[in-house]
Amino acid sequence: MSRRGPGQADKRPSDDRGIAPFGMTRREAWLSAAGLFLLALVVRAAAAAAIPFPVPEDTAYYVAVARNLVEGRGLVSDALWSYQTLPLAVPRAAFEVWLPLPTFLAALPMLLFGATFRAAQVAAVAVGALVPVLAWRLAADVTEERRLPPGRARTLALGTGLVACAYGPLVVHGALPDSTMPFAALALAACLLMARILHDPGSARIGDPRLVALGALLGIAALARNEAVWVALTWAGLAWLGAGPLDRRARARLIAVPAVISIAIYLPWLVRDWLAFGSPLPGQALANALSVSGFDIFAWQDRPTLARYVAQGLGGLIGARIDGFEHNLVDVLLVPAIPAGPLGLVALPWQGRGAALRPLLLFSLITFTATTLLFPVATQWGTFLHAAGPVQVLLLIASLLVLDVLLARVARQRAWTRPVAWLGPLLVAATAIPILAISVASIAGVARDAQVRYVALGDRLTARGLPPSRAAPIVADHPIWVTWSLRVPTLGLPDEPPASVLDLARHFDAHVLVVSGTHGVWPAILATGGPRAACFVPLDLADGAGGSPTGPLADTHAYRIACPP
């Protein structure tokens, strides 16, 4: 440890030594960061090896567009699953709702190793491995702020990083080429930088590298997820209200410099969207906010409208938000992260008050509240899930902080002479690792089943000469998986009556419908014999002549779309 002179007692050591947290030399800090990154890399690579197919479908979307990009077709999607944004054509320009950074990241290893899902996972694993390093650095900042003894501080910070290496919600998405981990890494880095700038805001000038770096992080995060707007709002609020005695001009400078940098980075994408879709804004955002069912994302004729939304009544509007709140809290934050999730949530009001965690806490509150209140239905299909990586890290740190406090209190009461800070991370890891194994095994099983199903489906349809042309689209309940596996244009199946689906098929000249399992009212609605049901003629998917399909296609139904004379 370096010695401090008079008046330096409150100065954080990291201000003098950059990366080195309290109680560490710069060399030890770099070795710790490298070790955590390598361990996280190994764990995520092992998880990725168990997942052979892009699940869920948003993962397949990013990877399929990356494949098209690498093959020279540009940012094009062969799956049209949302009909809320013009032009309605398939194939068409990709990312009318989602954003391109995950595809760009996936395309890099694809260029080197081939346009496969395995190649795309390489980038996901590498980016995901950065998150435990950032979690370690955040925890280290907290220990510095609290002036913990060096040994205890080092154990808590490294323990946080080590647990994050095997923390289920972070590992699973670190094995999938989607937006979750790129956004988590960027948002966490931005929150780290915010806390450091606010530690001495008066020293920040227009050309300050910290402000430029923050703007770059915000701009790149905006290319990963739309929730980057909440990261930017977090900074604007903290810079204006929490920058100490600075005058308005200085506070405005703190906000304006990152804003200009981030807009400059994101502006080309806005222009591209304007040229491709006629608007720089995400076309489905309003439709998602007005959804009354998760199936509204596939709506063709019965599209979300304000009138239908209001017609739910006050009870329906409140009920949707209760369901969204329960999903975001229980299904996303607590159950996959036992025990750290529940423990961290209980401890957060006491453990999240410090300046080091303030940006991350504020971002977490804004994001949770916004997705719950503004998108209560869409969030049950993944909106908050894919933006929750930083929140998971916050809860992990809070849980380990409260365990550290409790263990220190017990050690004092019982007059223990040996360090016990390591017990907290050990207790959390002892539960987290088995849950991680279960989570990976579960998603790997889904991936294998989907892979086998769609390979078999492609073989059966090809054997029967369907679709009649590789340019003819298929209507399917899992359009992105069909596109990835069969390499044919695919349309999302609306949860609407047969007449509406027939109108969709006629509009795009589609001749085949595929339903795997149950998709809203499909395929049961055809058994009622209602209007236009006869236009969907069952196809034999059995392996051989006659009989019913078995094995991977046992619950899959295919139909020829052709009205009788």
Image: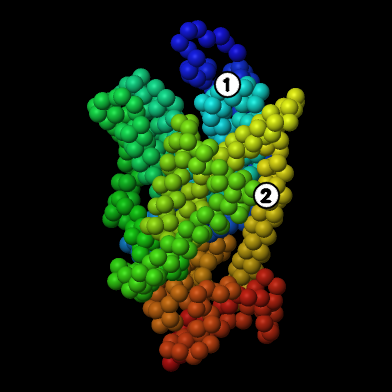
Q: How is the image coloured?
A: rainbow
Q: Can you give x and y, in whole percent of width and height, for residue 163 in the image?
A: 65, 39
Taking the image as shown, residue 368 lies to the left or right of residue 252, namely right
Report whether residue 371 is seen.
yes
Report which residue position mark 1 lands on. 22
Task: Tell me if residue 133 comes above or below residue 523 in the rendering.
Answer: above
Task: Tell me if residue 461 comes above or below residue 564 in the rendering.
Answer: above
Q: Can you give x and y, in whole percent of width and height, for residue 417 in the image?
A: 75, 24
User: 10 Å neighbourhood of mark 1: few (<14), some, or many (≥20)?
Assistant: many
Task: Tell me if residue 195 comes above or below residue 232 in the rendering.
Answer: above
User: 10 Å neighbourhood of mark 2: few (<14), some, or many (≥20)?
Assistant: many
Q: Label 1 is placed on what type of residue?
A: Phe
Q: Along the polypeptide, which appears first: circle 2 or circle 1?
A: 1
Q: Where's the C terminus, which quadrant?
A: bottom left
Q: Residue at x 53, y 30 (%)?
A: 142
Q: Where's the N terminus, which quadrant?
A: top right
Q: Residue at x 47, y 72 (%)?
A: 493
Secondary structure under tag 2 reads: helix
Quick one: 197 or 288, which is closer to the camera? 197
Quick one: 183 or 372, which is closer to the camera? 372
The circle on residue 436 is 2
Q: Can you give x and y, in whole percent of width and height, for residue 379 in the image?
A: 46, 58
Q: Can you give x and y, in whole percent of width and height, for residue 152 in the image?
A: 65, 26
Q: Label 2 is placed on what type of residue?
A: Leu
Count how many numbered circles sit on residues in the image.
2
Question: Residue 491 falls in which quadrant of the image?
Answer: bottom left
Q: Nearer the viewer, mark 2 or mark 1?
A: 1
Taking the image as shown, residue 366 lies to the left or right of residue 422, namely left
Q: Report the Cα–Cα distance between label 2 and label 1.
A: 31 Å
Quick one: 167 or 221, which is closer to the camera? 167
